[in-house]
Amino acid sequence: MKILVRIKKDASGYYRAWCPALPGCFSYGPTQDEAVEKLNEAILCYLASLDAIIPTLEPKVLEMTA
C-alpha cells in the first residue's frame, strides 16, 4: 500500500510529516527518518481506528516540499 506523505522542515529545524489523505494524521521529529517513522505509526493507528485491515507499511517519501 502506498500513501502520499509530505515532509517539511520548519523554522525550529524539526521535520513535520503529514498525510494529506488522512485528515489530522501528522507527526514531527528531529530527522526526516524519525518523522516518517512516527508518521507510519500514526497512519497505522488512524487506520485501526477506522476498523480497516492494517497492512504492513513501508514508508516511502513520494514528494518533499521545501
Image (cartoon, rainbow, N blue to C red):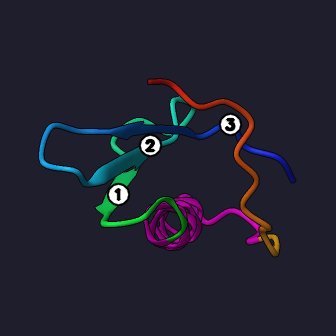
Nearer-N-terminus badge (2/3): 3
Secondary element at tag 2: strand
Q: Which residue is mark 1?
A: 27
Amino acid marked by disc 1: Ser
Q: Earlier in the sequence, mark 3 or mark 1?
A: 3
Under mark 2, the amino acid is Trp
Which residue is labeled 2 in the image?
18
Q: Is residue 52 magenta?
A: yes
Which residue lies at the image location 44% right of the left edge and 43% below the top edge? Answer: 18
| Vertical comparison of 7 with 28: above or below | above
Q: Mark 1 falls on what kind of element?
A: strand
- Circles 3 and 1 in contact, beta carbons < 8 Å: no
Q: In the figure, 45 relative to 62: above or below?
A: below
Residue 2: x and y in percent read: 83, 47
Residue beneath label 3, please?
4
- Circle 1 packing at 10 Å, graded few (<14), some (14-19), many (20+), is many
Where does the magenta region start and end?
Answer: 34-54
Residue 37: where, in percent of width, then height? Answer: 54, 72
